[in-house]
Amino acid sequence: MNVRLAVHLTVSTVIAIALVFTGLNLWGPLGALLAMIVWYFLEQAIKALLPVSFLSSVPGTQATSAMYRDWASRLVASLGMYPSRTPAGDLARLGSGIRLGMLSHANRDGSQVLGFLVLARTGETTTSVAWRRRGKQYTEQPIDSSHGVTVHQSREQQNPVQARFGFTTSVGLGGDTYWVRPQDAELLALVLRPAEAAAAPAEPTAAAAEPAPAAAAPAAPSASA
C-alpha cells in the first residue's frame, strides 16, 4: 500500500464514522444505516475519480487501468472522463518509461498464487516481463517472453471468486499460465505480439502473388487493307 492510498483510506474512514454518528444523532439507527449507504456510494465514486497512482501495485510501478472495473468506474468512463484508461493508454504510459504492475493469479510450480506481472520498457520496441508474488518478502522473477503471449480463448475460469473479480482470461507466458482481466490481456497482446509479428517472414502481397497481365495482342488488319 502506498502513502497516497493510506491517506485516502484514513480520510475515508473518518468520513464514514462522522456520517454514521451524524445519522445516528439525527434519525437514530435508521439514520446510521442510511449514512452507511450514502458513504458506500460516495466512496466508490471517489475511488473511480482517483488517479492511477493511488492504486495499490508493486513498489516502483503503477497499476494498469484494468483496476478500474466497478460500476462507478464504468459510470465515469461513460461520461467521457479519463479516456486514457484503456490498454492503449497503458501502452502509452509504458512507452514513457513508467513500469506497470498487472494483478493476476499465476499457475506456477504446481500451485496458484496471487501476484503481479511487471512490465517495463527496455528499448524502443522491446518490453521485459517479470513475476512478483504478492508480499514484501518476494522479489521479481524474470519471464522469458521471447515467444510472445498466448491467449487461451477456449479456457473458462472455474474459480467463482476469481471470476467475480474479473480474472476471466487465461494467458500463457514463459511456460506458465496466468489468469488476468480481459483489459490486461489486451495490453499484453499489444506489448508482446508486435515483436513476434516483426520476426515472422513477410507474406507476399496480393499484387506480387498474381501474375502480371499478358501484353495485348496486335490488332488484326482490316479487310480494306
Image (cartoon, rainbow, N blue to C red):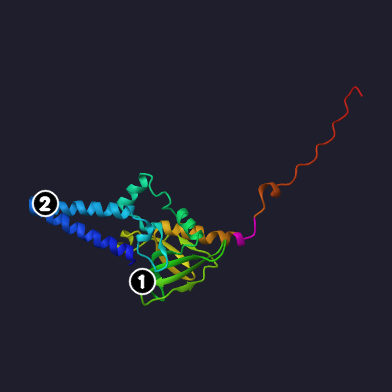
Give the crowd class for mark 2: few <14, some 14-19, many >=20 residues within 10 Å: some
Quarter of the image where the N terminus is located? bottom left
Asked which secondary structure carries label 2, the reply is helix
Q: The magenta stretch spans which residues? A: 198-202
Name the kind of residue labelled 2 in the image.
Gly
The disc at residue 134 is 1
Residue at image position (19%, 57%) is: 16
Asked where in the image residue 100 lies, by quadrant, the reply is bottom left
Horizontally, residue 110 falls left or right of residue 205, namely left
- In the rendered structure, are the residues bearing label 1 and label 2 in contact, judged by CB atoms less than 8 Å apart? no
Residue that numbered label 2 is attached to:
31
- 19 and 159: which is toward the camera: 19
Name the kind of residue labelled 1 in the image.
Arg
Please tell me whether residue 139 belongs to the stretch shown in magenta.
Answer: no
Q: Main secondary structure of the magenta part?
A: loop
Q: How many marks?
A: 2
Q: Position of residue 170 (x, y in %)?
A: 42, 63
Please tell me whether residue 200 belongs to the stretch shown in magenta.
Answer: yes
- 84 and 190: which is toward the camera: 84
Quarter of the image where the C terminus is located? top right
Horizontally, residue 90 falls left or right of residue 225, namely left
Q: Position of residue 14 (x, y in %)?
A: 20, 60
Q: Position of residue 10 (x, y in %)?
A: 24, 63
